[in-house]
Amino acid sequence: MLKIFTTQLSGIFSRIGEKQAEAIEDGARLLAQAVVSGHGVYFHGKNELAAVALEATESKEPFPCAKVLPLDQTERSLLHPSDRVLLFYSEPEDEEIESLVKELHAQGTPVVGVGPAQKEPSMIEEHCDVHIDFQLKKPLVPADDGTRFGYPALMTCLYVYHALSFTVKEIVEEYE
């Protein structure tokens, strides 16, 4: 099973690198604008994806200008138009994420969304300034009974996070 999981996960990472390179570049440019101007890059992840915000703020290599997005709507309303939000989610029809992205869009805060793309763009995708498809459509490992398990949403989001982080670093270094 581990070999199947590893092969499938490697394939997901390759697809992200190949199919989402342009979206990652666009997202990194948007985030780099906040970094260069000294504004905040606010991170939010739903459920287990909140770990990406910890990686961005508490790791050995924190993301420049990284902050955790406030849960309080009044505090979020204080975001500056030059701030950016990097939003991670795994359900394309999540009402809480839909409400959050609508709120941020309405107040003029640019959002880079990372989650599953749909054949027809979801409301979440439509309200993001840049959307990056994390390429995870279903669990990766088939079971004997025909079901599947192993849905590494956090791993794929961390892969996208690091791709964005490296690209932002390159952009900021070129700017300086």
Image (tube, rainbow, N blue to C red):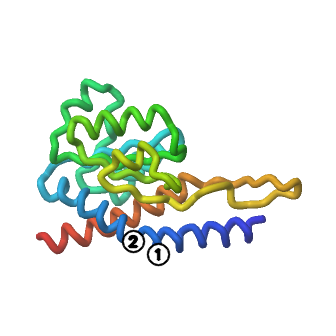
- Residue at 54%, 44% in the rendered image: 91
Q: Residues within 10 Å of mark 2 (few under 14, many from 20)?
A: some
| Tag 1 residue | 18
Label 2 secondary element = helix
- Residue 154 in the image: x percent, y percent? 53, 52
Q: Amino acid at mark 1?
A: Glu
Q: Amino acid at mark 2?
A: Ala
Horizontally, residue 105 falls left or right of residue 143, namely: left
Q: Which mark is on residue 130?
A: none
| Tag 2 residue | 21
The C terminus - image quarter: bottom left
- Residue 72 in the image: x percent, y percent? 32, 26
Horizontally, residue 40 falls left or right of residue 5, namely: left
Instruction: Tell me whether circle 1 and circle 2 mark residues in contact (CB < 8 Å).
Output: yes
Q: Is residue 66 visible?
A: yes
- Residue at 78%, 65% in the rendered image: 1
- Residue 59 in the image: x percent, y percent? 39, 54
The residue lying toward the viewer, choosing from 30 and 32, is: 30
The residue lying toward the viewer, choosing from 102 and 176, is: 102
- Residue at 84%, 56% in the rendered image: 146
Horizontally, residue 97 falls left or right of residue 147, namely: left
Label 1 secondary element = helix
- Residue 160 in the image: x percent, y percent? 44, 61
